[in-house]
Image (spheres, helix red, strand yellow):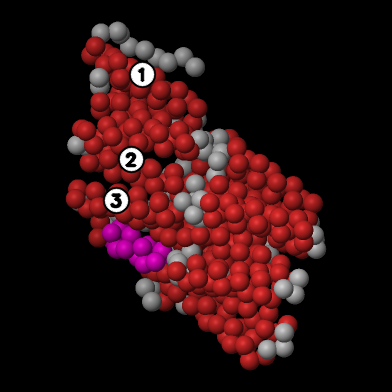
Amino acid sequence: MEIIKLHTNSRDRYQEVDLLNKEAKTSRKSNGSTSLTMSKEAIYIAQDLGYSEGLAKAYFNAGISCRLSSTFESAIEYFRKALETYRLLKDFKGESRTINALANVYYSLGNFKKAIEYYDECIFVLQSLGDLKFEAIVLTNRGLSLQQFGDLKASLNNYLECLSIYKSLGEPVHYALFNNLGLVYLDMGRYNEALKYFIEALKRTMKSNNVIDQGYTLANMGRAYIYMEEHSNAITYLSEAMIIMRKFGDRQAEIQVFSNLGKAYLNLKNYPLAIKYFNRALKYYREIADSSSVSHTLSELGEVYFELNDYISSRKYLTDGLELAVNIKDMVNEVRNTTGLAKLYVRFHDTETANMYLQRAEKIAKKRMSFKELSKIFKIYSDIHAATGNTKEAKLFISKHYECLKELVCMDQENKINAIMMGHIKSTDFPKDLFKKTHFDTNLKRASRTGTI
């Protein structure tokens, strides 16, 4: 690529850095490699000039480009350099944006606990600045991390706080909040409401012409159709999302689509295709060093082989997934793989080992207030006691199972967030020209992790 250069005198070279930074920012969501090339050129010139303001922006743009291409180690390195430079300049606005960007990287890596710590640090800086508009964006990102961590109640409270900021500022609700709330309602099992939020997010991303976020939303809609057992729609939307991910080079999002396609084919009991997509996801997750998603995919493969009655393979995948989750301190996937192993040992009639795994999973899930995980754990406990003829204990645990499901269903009633948000949705209809622009399936009978901002 040919970089446009200005005159070689000092003043013009400062302008050259500014121009490169401006063009890098503009192109980073449409052509990540071009943005990174421009950022590196800006870094080189700014270092030569000792131009700290331009250098900090160049580091920041380079970090964003690397995160979007799933080159996470490089992204962290660039963001740390940007943060150091902004702090030397006492540029608190630049510091806050960089801390949020660092948190986004750790979110992408599945380290939700560390991501939340960075979001909290960012909010502290923003509150000292009185920058409420960007604080709402950070709260949206923080809520998504809490949701992925399993604490849906805290996530909804976070979103309520975010909504109060938008109301106080008289600002429209950002489309990312609709996407994130859709994900929460998926976890609650309220799929039609989730789909309403995704449709609204899609309309808003189309209006803002943000194609990458359209891709995230389409992938989320595909996930919703998986849960609704409308697998034809699921595969259509996921495939459409993949076209966008590939076009813009968002590798992690593309891999998440592979994983969701694997889930769709697993639900269809098309095990060869499920294994194909999960293995493809596993390979690419390893290439981008997304260890959390590797652990998750290993648990998915463990489930496939469990359904195939290949218990040796199932146990290996689940054990490997558990070992990795423990090594990276990933409590979400520790519970996922531990619960899978418990189900496996129930099938072996080894209730002692199954109970050991369940107790371990229950302790972690309770610590994180994850009612979704606890509902699954209590259901397995009930199955164990029913199989051994202990009817009293089986009824006790099935009652706990339903209590957790009830907690999930009623979770938003306390803060009334659904009623508030529905006031922002005028219609769940798609824009009239939507299907002219895409190849979506129009058969909406009941009409991957979204990205952070």
- In the figure, residue 342 lies in which quadrant? bottom right
CB atoms at circles 2 and 1 under 8 Å apart?
no
> Of the residues under marks 2 and 3, which one precedes in the sequence?
2
- In the figure, residue 400 lies in which quadrant? bottom right
- In the figure, residue 377 lies in which quadrant? bottom right
Location of mark 2 (residue): 98
| Residue located 28% across and 44% down the image | 96
Secondary structure of the residue carrying tag 1 is helix
Determine if the magenta segment contains residue 164. yes
Q: In this view, does 240 lie to the left or right of 54?
A: right
Indicate whether 398 appears above or below 58.
below
User: Residue 365, how many percent across, how many down?
Assistant: 50, 68
Outermost residue to the bottom: 392
> Which kind of residue does numbered mark 1 sit on?
Tyr
Residue 184 shows in the view = yes
Instruction: Tell me, for residue 70, which label it has, or none.
Output: none
> Of the residues under marks 2 and 1, which one precedes in the sequence?
1
Q: State how far apart marks 3 and 1 are (Cα).
A: 30 Å
245 vs 438, nearest the viewer? 245
Instruction: Tell me, for residue 44, which label it has, or none.
Output: 1
Q: Main secondary structure of the magenta part?
A: helix
Q: State how far apart marks 2 and 3 are (Cα).
A: 11 Å
Instruction: Tell me, for residue 121, which label it has, or none.
Output: 3
Q: Is residue 238 left or right of residue 198?
A: right
> Which kind of residue does numbered mark 3 sit on?
Glu
Q: Which residues are drawn in magenta?
A: 154-167
User: Residue 245, how many percent across, how many down?
Assistant: 57, 40
Secondary structure of the residue carrying tag 3 is helix
Q: Is residue 95 left or right of residue 238?
A: left
Outermost residue to the top: 8
Determine if the magenta segment contains residue 348. no
